[in-house]
Amino acid sequence: MEALIQPRHGEVLSFPAGASRAEEAPVMEKINQFALYEIGQTFQKLRKADTSNVDAFDAFWDLSLAQAQIDKMLSGTPFALGVSAGKASEVRQAIQNTINRNFYAKNPDGTFALDEEGKCKWDFPARGTKKIESWELSMVTNALDKFETVFAEEMREGTSYHIPQRGITSVVALVEHGEKAFPEELGHIIGIKAMADFKAACRCFAFDLYTASGYHSARAVEAVLETYYQTFANKPGETLRGWNDYVEALKKVKDKKPKQKYLPDGRTLLSVDEIRFHHRNPLMHPRVTLTETDADMLLSIAKVAMLAMSQEIKCVWSERKAIAAKIKAKQKG
């Protein structure tokens, strides 16, 4: 499937398949860095237990918590492990071996005793009745040492960024909730494609990608403009060659005689056309780059234009729905 880009004068150029990244889910992920602190705390408890023989009752909980943390890391929480995954698996196995030796019932021949469901039976000692020797826990902490050495190198290659506040806009809102810039009832009118581009514009703005933010802002406006044209021209599914063609066609609808009940607002058309001429068209030039102020302004006016068009579309859709309901009721009567 090919995506289309309309650079200027209505000319249509083909873009390679897969170019419309705005419609896909973002590849970035939010990381809970406090989870690393919790993991460190859990592992530190094992190191303290390694210094002497410890009560099995107390050691079990430290071992279980550490195993749970390793399982989370192996499953990709708080992020996917790279080369350290193999060493993490060795830590998990060392913990499991210690649990197997000390907390599962054994048959006289040394095999695990099984319950009626075929699962290993627990043999959980009461506090003060059994000790785990330090050499057993040393096997766990030795595996942990090897994991931490590799993990430390892996983390040096990793990247974490702090995103500064953008004016009065919440960084979290920009990165994760761009759709909240619009009333919820207008979401289905704005549409998936336009909303995806607007959210991409917000994320790019948050990450200092100002020219990319402007590009996605313009795409979002044009996507709603397409629906705006189809609604007022009463031509569902019809697409034109470029932004200017949509504006000119809508002007003709506005000036057509006799006038229809709902017409595109001249102020909306003017604002959309000014975005095209003063912002969208210059962005097509490879030497044009946007500053933070430029991108912020385009993001704001794009939002206003999208709101204006979607509000007008909503009025027309509501009217047509009401008319269709009256016709249906009349036919039934």
Image (cartoon, rainbow, N blue to C red):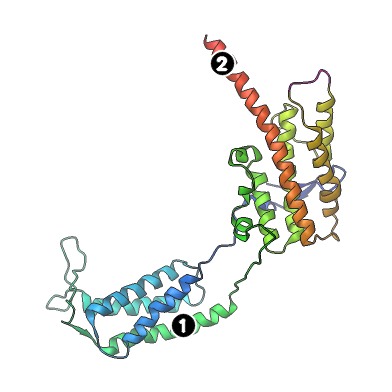
Instruction: Measuring from the top left, give residue 298's x and y in whole percent.
Output: 77, 52
Q: Which mark identifies residue 163?
A: none
Q: The disc labelled 2 sits on which kind of residue? A: Lys
The residue wearing badge 2 is 328
Query: Is 106 located above or below residue 168 in the figure?
Result: below
- Asked if the stretch drawn in magenta spans residue 260, the answer is yes
Q: Secondary structure at mark 2?
A: helix
Give me the residue at 65% from left, 46% from top: 195
Instruction: Give the main secondary structure, helix, strand or loop, of the magenta stretch.
Output: loop
Closer to the chain start, of discs 2 and 1, is 1
Q: Looking at the rendering, which quadrant does residue 169 occupy? A: bottom right
Give me the residue at 72% from left, 31% from top: 230
Q: Looking at the rendering, which quadrant does residue 192 occupy? A: top right
Q: Looking at the rendering, which quadrant does residue 65 occupy? A: bottom left
Instruction: Measuring from the top left, give residue 142's x and y in whole percent.
Output: 38, 87
Question: 108 or 267: which is nearer to us?
Answer: 267
Label 2 close to label 1 by CB (< 8 Å)? no
| Circle 1 Cα neighbour tier, 10 Å, few/some/many (<14 / 14–19 / ≥20) | some
The answer to whether any part of residue 89 appears in the image is yes
The answer to whether any part of residue 3 appears in the image is no
- The range drawn in magenta is 257-261
- Asked if the stretch drawn in magenta spans residue 318, the answer is no
Give me the residue at 39% from left, 82% from top: 44
Instruction: Measuring from the top left, give residue 128's x and y in whole percent.
Output: 17, 82
Residue ranking furthest to the left: 108
Q: The disc labelled 1 sits on which kind of residue? A: Glu
The residue wearing badge 1 is 148
Alpha-carbon span between mark 2 and mark 1: 71 Å
Query: Is 114 located above or below residue 58 in the figure?
Result: above
Q: Secondary structure at mark 1?
A: helix
